[in-house]
Image: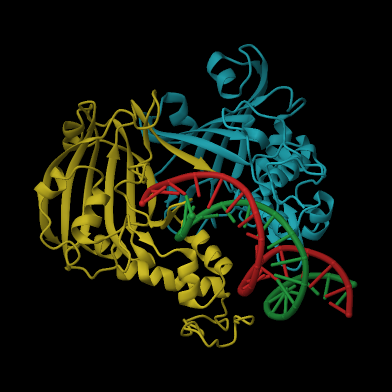
Chain colours: A yellow, B cyan, C green, D red
Amino acid sequence: MAQTPSSSNDNALAQLGAQEQATPAFSPLYQQIKVLILQSLQSGEWKPGEAIPSEIDLAARFRVSQGTVRKAIDELAAENLVVRRQGKGTFVATHSEQHVQYRFLKLMPDSGNQDTDGPAQRSVLECKRVRATADIARALALRSGDPVVQVRRTLSFGGVPTILEDLWLPGNAFKGITADQMAGYQGPTYAMFEVEFGVRMVRAEEKIRAVAADAQQALLLNVEHASPLLSVERIAYTYNDVPMELRRGLYRTDTHHYRNDLS
Amino acid sequence: MAQTPSSSNDNALAQLGAQEQATPAFSPLYQQIKVLILQSLQSGEWKPGEAIPSEIDLAARFRVSQGTVRKAIDELAAENLVVRRQGKGTFVATHSEQHVQYRFLKLMPDSGNQDTDGPAQRSVLECKRVRATADIARALALRSGDPVVQVRRTLSFGGVPTILEDLWLPGNAFKGITADQMAGYQGPTYAMFEVEFGVRMVRAEEKIRAVAADAQQALLLNVEHASPLLSVERIAYTYNDVPMELRRGLYRTDTHHYRNDLS
DNA sequence: CAGTGGTCTAGACCACACT
DNA sequence: GTGTGGTCTAGACCACTGC
């Protein structure tokens, strides 16, 4: 069945409603399957860390061959939304036990392997509810004046304050978040977001600049006034490209560097 | 045939010589095919921009099914070594016509789309043969004192000098390179390397820091002394992870930013 | 052992580009 | 039309995990 992916099928696929595309919105079967799996991920049918149904089960459920399901899952795995483990199953990706923790943090110690200067010590300086300014609203796809949570914190490695950052989170999704929550959770902050608020970050964009430390920043990071710092502005997205966090960080790069692989 | 990829076959595959791996050095058929295609790419059997044989031809040549060749090529395409074009064929990737030119340059203008401030104006300040210092030798996998070519240049956008960078190239591979060549070539420098020296860069690693401009750098980039600049150290690799260029750049980030997508 | 993902095959048909 | 890559299927077998 379903040899002609553009025609309607007798299964649950048919053709997804025509999006606002000029083209006839054709997509191959495996892409449609991918969308369906994605919807189940978003809806929370399978939670981070859990196994999703086996390829055979999914093939039966969607009435397609195992190979088609496989190709859909392959793409989800390539996008880090899902992790395959031979002999065990396919699991919803999570920032918790994902053996590479701090997946989005590209700051590495100059010497020594990976981030083996251990987990960062967090220090939350501030956690308050504010109203979104114009630029913050734009970044988070909100309206000016909408409630947001603003967090200011530092991260230290081996006792040395290395990162100073401000976070802005949509107030609706992060109702009731506290400084204690931000500081006390063991493990990555994004893992806490998954557990406490059901928000899973799947990708992010960063804009990086070199800036000079102002007086307050210099104090908090224990550097000279006007020292050069790496400014990292990040917008993190959940499923469906919905922005859920704006983060403005200042990194000391005297003992660490920002690492990037190009290909 | 070849149902048991770990056993020897009657084709040209057998098992590639046991590398220095503790494991029995098993690899699936499609990986072996991938290595064979890779070797043909390195050897120059197919040059950048040219089409490689069709999947059917390659399948016949290696005595495997088209699906196996397909999976090998899929991985090569994912690594940007090769570009697939439906209906036309599969082509060796190139920095020349690759519709995204400057693939490794992540500096974007703050406003305006992509790099539509046009191509950079190059200005070559220096191009000389020197001997590798210890750190440069290490980066390029050479010995201290080995001949290298050092190039210093600036890149300007809209007349504003924005990038100041030094390049170090292995002397052997880039014999006879001149300042005129560096300055005069139309298009990306890496495209020139392909055409003139047969060196194709396939991936790179960057280490990024914030630094303060010294007197000379400030002069060349037309900024205040001690202005914060983005320091970008890049090592670019050809096939087989052989380093072929060390580049130390200083980017002005007052009108541009370094963009990075995380996933 | 059964169940999972991973590999390989062979064949059919579709979408696209060129001639 | 011919040839290319792209999709889909069905079935066989391999490799790994855990009972």
User: Can residue B95 be seen by looking at this rendering?
Assistant: no
Q: Nearer the viewer, residue A112 or B129?
A: A112
Left or right, A27 with respect to A19, comes to right
Q: Quadrant of the C terminus of chain A?
A: top right
Q: Position of residue B140 (x, y in %)?
A: 60, 24
Q: Nearer the viewer, residue C15 or B150?
A: C15
A229 relative to A60, above or below? above
Left or right, B37 with respect to A44, comes to right
A136 relative to A124, above or below? below
B81 relative to B136, above or below? below
Left or right, A226 with respect to A123, comes to right
Q: Position of residue B72 (x, y in %)?
A: 67, 51
Q: Quadrant of the N terminus of chain A?
A: bottom right
Name of the residue lying farthest toward the top:
B145
* Residue under the point 35% across and 29% down: A256
Q: Position of residue C11 (x, y in %)?
A: 77, 72
Q: Nearer the viewer, residue C14 or B114?
A: C14
Count the numbered circles shown: 0
Q: Position of residue A47 (x, y in %)?
A: 30, 61
User: Can residue A87 be seen by looking at this rendering?
Assistant: yes
B239 relative to B172, above or below? below
Asked where in the image residue A133 lies, by quadrant, the reply is: bottom left
